[in-house]
Image (spheres, helix red, strand yellow):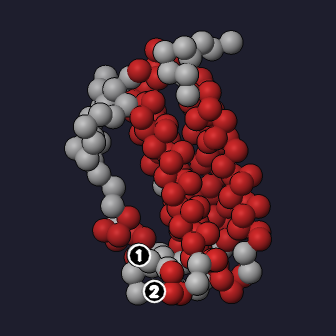
Amino acid sequence: MIDFQHKPDCKAILRGLSDTHTILSAFIAAIPEKDLYAKRGENFWSIAEHLAHLAGVQPMGLERITRILDEDTPEFVPFFPDEDETLKTTSLPTIAESLSDFKKGRTAIVERLTEAIPEDWKRLAVHPEYKQYGLHIFARHIFMHDYWHMYRMEELWLTRDAYLKE
């Protein structure tokens, strides 16, 4: 059994990352199809776009985790989805494709993190956006990123226009 006494939330982060697909899939299944693609405002993504983004960043997450585990203090560049030209020129995947891609990517991330030993969770990296960065912070960041987007999708689905804010 892996001892995470130095970072007691590691097991919880892994459980959360493992459970996200189940929660996300059930959540998406509850939303009427017309609401999945609705654009609620000029600067708002649709629910389907949020889902495609979550699926699309899984390979980047795995690549960063792999680099943190395999390199000494790797350096990363910021990723801004609104500036990514590939997201602007490609068509949106279907909901089923996004969920499948998310599950595949997330399974690979969880497997890679599960293989990490306690000392690996202390490994550091450099990212210009953040004061601190490393495996533990990034794994937690993935978890929080997922749930931020899911919260935003729920807002887009359920919040009345008068209360919806950017």
**Any part of residue 52 in sight:** no
Q: Residue at x 59, y 23 (%)?
A: 115
**Any part of residue 19 in sight:** yes
In the picture, measured across the screen, residue 88 lies left or right of residue 118, that is left
Q: Is residue 57 above or below residue 137?
A: below
Kind of residue at badge 1: Glu
In the picture, measured across the screen, residue 24 lies left or right of residue 41, that is right
Residue 125 position by quadrant: top left
Q: What percent of the width, then of the height, locates residue 13?
A: 58, 35
Q: What percent of the width, then of the height, locates residue 147?
A: 56, 54
Alpha carbon distance from label 2 to label 1: 8 Å
Ranked by sequence position, the earlier of labels 2 and 1 is 2
Mark 2 Cα-neighbour bin, 10 Å: few <14, some 14–19, many ≥20? few
Q: Residue at x 73, y 60 (%)?
A: 25
Q: Residue at x 66, y 83 (%)?
A: 35
How many discs appear?
2
Mark 1 Cα-neighbour bin, 10 Å: few <14, some 14–19, many ≥20? few
Kind of residue at badge 2: Gly
Q: What percent of the width, then of the height, locates residue 119?
A: 46, 14
Along the line of sight, the residue nearer the viewer: 52 or 133 = 133
Residue 111 position by quadrant: top right
- The label on residue 2 is none
Residue marked by disc 2: 41
The answer to whether marks 2 and 1 mark residues whose Cβ atoms lie closer than 8 Å is yes
Outermost residue to the left: 128
Q: Is residue 19 above or below residue 23?
A: above
Along the line of sight, the residue nearer the viewer: 94 or 164 = 164
Along the line of sight, the residue nearer the viewer: 162 or 32 = 162
Residue marked by disc 1: 166
Q: What secondary structure is found at the residue carrying circle 1? A: loop
Q: What percent of the width, then of the height, locates residue 160?
A: 58, 84
